[in-house]
Image: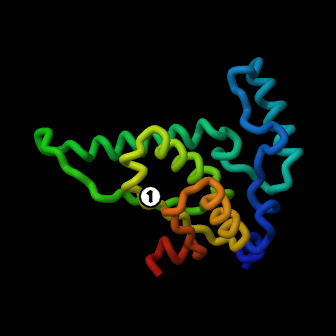
Amino acid sequence: QRLALYYAQPFESVVGEISRYGDINFASLLGEWHWRRIHREAYQSQKGQWMTPVELFRPHYSKAFARFIASEFLNTQTLNNNATICHDSFHIVELGGGRGTNASIILSKLREWYPDLYSKLRYTIVDASPSLHELQQKVMIDSGHDHVECLHADLLDVATGE
């Protein structure tokens, strides 16, 4: 029941974003104390109850995932004594997609860096929050990723195969 009430809130009340700072330039930080100050101010200025690492370390966190996904995909192309295996498609499922930031950055970077992989990719976001689900759909459309499926589902049902 409590989770249902939590997820029924507007998306701004659930997952926050660092809108005041934009992307944090970590190279400009003067040390741990500076990061702690930026982090504290970011939390105080946002409306959500919490922020994901994707939001805090945007875009670096998602770019690292994009590189990992591409590496894994490319590594599975060559198996069994270097025999080439061609995959027609590649499917990523993100459970609890938050504000859609992770999917948007991963897909944008794959489109930029690995267009062949991007063209074979299917991406599915599953989220229990109706308001985050709507935001994810909007973010995917706004960022030009039309082959993303956004599903509104209870994650416990997904985990148990229901």
| Residue appearing at x 72%, y 77% in the figure | 4
User: Seen in the image, is 33 located left or right of residue 129?
Assistant: right
Task: Quickly name the residue at label 1.
Answer: 92
Query: Number of labelled discs?
Result: 1
Secondary structure state at the residue bearing disc 1: strand
Look at the picture and state if 153 lies above or below 147: below
Tell me where residue 138 appears, x and y as whole percent. Answer: 67, 63
| Residue appearing at x 80%, y 68% in the figure | 10
Tell me where residue 36 appears, x and y as whole percent. Answer: 79, 31
Tell me where residue 50 appears, x and y as whole percent. Answer: 76, 53
Quarter of the picture containing the N terminus is bottom right
> Badge 1 local density, few (<14 within 10 Å), some, or many (20+)?
few
User: Seen in the image, is 59 located left or right of residue 89?
Assistant: right
Q: In which quarter of the image is residue 68?
A: top left
| Residue appearing at x 53%, y 62% in the figure | 146
Look at the picture and state if 96 lies above or below 110: below
User: Seen in the image, is 137 located left or right of residue 112?
Assistant: right
Query: Which is nearer the eye, 4 or 42?
Result: 42
Tell me where residue 122 appears, x and y as whole percent. Answer: 43, 61
Q: How is the image coloured?
A: rainbow
User: Seen in the image, is 66 located left or right of residue 39?
Assistant: left
| Residue appearing at x 60%, y 62% in the figure | 96
The amino acid type found where label 1 is placed reads Ile
